[in-house]
Image (tube, grey):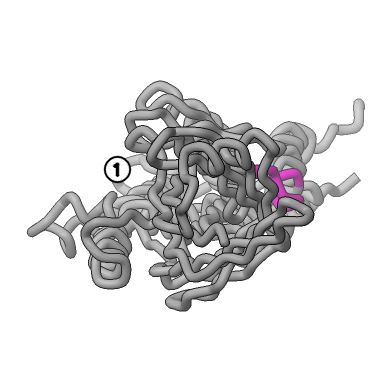
């Protein structure tokens, strides 16, 4: 059987490109403060929108990291597609090694970032957000100048995050399938 | 398979070129954006993580607050407008002005407090918000709260304020819910004189 393509890599590459486009418009994780919201944060590895009292905030370093992730994922997707149609070339393993783990890293690093975001405020200022769900967050007295303030907070993962997990899985599957695609064809016994 | 004068194969050279290209892509996709942003903010590296909009929000709203409310009041203190009393049902209605100094609409979902005689720190009754009130950005909205006083409160007024036409009251244990943000202030808030006849 002449295996000319790595179909899993082809699907993974296309899915990665689709994931990038979706992630630019739909966040992976959302944080809403108050109802109606007075502050909100929409996060994905390639995009962040943070607004307070109607003012949108841009953190330059985060913007740069988002752009770096966007370029890295895009490059990974394109290289994956190139590898997918030429899986048996001598350099194909390098192409695969460069590309298959990009979505996986994006998912893992994003998950770590969200966990830290919800846990670290408790260590520094005395309150924390739920990872997913609704809660009433009590601000420390030191922050509220003697007034008791509790804030309704709602957080949750949005569907692109779960799609990213699937894309990461496709990348891993493409990596595993490479061994079958790149194996030399069996020679008939004489 | 062809070899050049150094013995390297064409395939080997191809792999090396691909490896170099991929390495350059890996470095460039991260160093490029981060380096550019750091270079643009080299004069004030704090702005890398603290955007200038934060200072605008803080400074802008503090200035607006001071201009709109005055130095003796906090944003939590309503401004008394008027009151109505029904002696038969022992109920009263208090109307206050609340100014939204932010560039954002707020929704007042709940307001409750204990009305206390300021002179004797005697609880006269409780008040509560009648309806949810939307307070648009930069505007002042009238908020009406209703309440009732007790027989004990009536006795207090009769005995301690026999000929008074008004009584100085404070609001204590004030609880406000604005956009699902609950603010509880235990310090008494002066409302001023309200008519009792």
Q: Residue at x 31, y 66 (%)?
A: B69
From what the image shows, is residue A121 above or below residue B162?
above
Q: Nearer the viewer, residue B164 or B131?
A: B164
From what the image shows, is residue A114 above or below residue A89?
above
Q: Nearer the viewer, residue A142 or B176?
A: B176
Do we see residue B69 in this rendering? yes
Residue B148, given in percent of the width and then of the height, sits at 69, 48
Would you call the spot at circle 1 few (<14 residues within 10 Å), some (14-19), or many (20 or more)?
Answer: few
| Position of the C terminus of chain B by quadrant | bottom right
Do we see residue A83 in this rendering? no
Q: Residue at x 71, y 54 (%)?
A: B91
Q: Report the number of numbered marks.
A: 1
Would you say B17 lies left or right of B159 here?
left
Q: Nearer the viewer, residue B47 or A183?
A: B47
Q: Residue at x 30, y 47 (%)?
A: B5
Magenta segment: does it hold A161?
yes
Q: Residue at x 47, y 45 (%)?
A: B161
Magenta segment: does it hold B36?
no
**Residue identifier under label 1:** B6
Chain bearing mark 1 = B
Would you say B120 lies left or right of A7 here?
left
Residue that protrudes farthest toward the top in the picture: A123
Magenta segment range?
A: A154-162
């Amino acid at each position: 059987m002449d295996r000319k393509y790595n179909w899993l890599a082809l699907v993974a590459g296309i899915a990665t490109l689709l994931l990038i486009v979706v992630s630019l418009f739909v966040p992976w994780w959302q944080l809403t403060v108050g109802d109606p919201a007075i502050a909100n944060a929409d996060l994905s590895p390639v995009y962040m929108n943070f607004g307070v009292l109607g003012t949108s905030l841009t953190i330059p370093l985060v913007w740069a990291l988002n752009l770096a992730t966007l370029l890295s994922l895009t490059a990974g997707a394109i290289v994956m597609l190139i590898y997918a149609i030429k899986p048996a070339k001598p350099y194909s393993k390098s192409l695969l090694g460069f590309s298959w783990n990009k979505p996986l890293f994006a998912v893992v690093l994003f998950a770590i970032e969200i966990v830290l975001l919800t846990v670290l405020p408790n260590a520094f200022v005395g309150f924390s957000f739920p990872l997913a769900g609704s809660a009433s967050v009590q601000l420390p007295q030191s922050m509220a100048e003697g007034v008791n303030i509790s804030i309704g907070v709602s957080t949750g993962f949005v569907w692109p995050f779960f799609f990213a997990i699937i894309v990461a899985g496709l990348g891993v599957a493409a990596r595993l399938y490479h061994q079958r695609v790149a194996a030399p064809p069996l020679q008939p016994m004489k | 398979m062809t070899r050049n004068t150094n013995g390297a194969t064409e395939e080997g050279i191809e792999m090396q070129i691909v490896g170099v290209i991929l390495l350059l892509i890996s470095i460039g996709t991260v160093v490029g954006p981060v380096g550019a942003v750091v270079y643009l903010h080299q004069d004030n590296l704090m702005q890398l993580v603290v955007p200038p909009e934060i200072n605008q929000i803080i400074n802008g709203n503090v200035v607006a607050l001071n201009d709109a409310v005055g130095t003796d009041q906090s944003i939590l203190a309503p401004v008394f407008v008027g009151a109505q009393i029904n002696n038969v049902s022992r109920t009263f209605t208090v109307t206050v002005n609340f100014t939204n100094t932010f560039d954002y609409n707020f929704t007042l979902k709940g307001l409750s407090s204990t009305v206390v005689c300021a002179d004797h720190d005697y609880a006269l009754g409780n008040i509560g918000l009648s309806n949810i009130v939307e307070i648009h950005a930069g505007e002042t909205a009238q908020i009406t709260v209703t309440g009732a006083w007790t027989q004990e409160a009536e006795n207090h007024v009769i005995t301690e304020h026999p000929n008074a036409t008004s009584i100085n009251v404070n609001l204590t244990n004030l609880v406000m819910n604005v956009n699902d943000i609950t603010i509880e202030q235990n310090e008494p808030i002066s409302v001023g004189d309200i008519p009792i006849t």
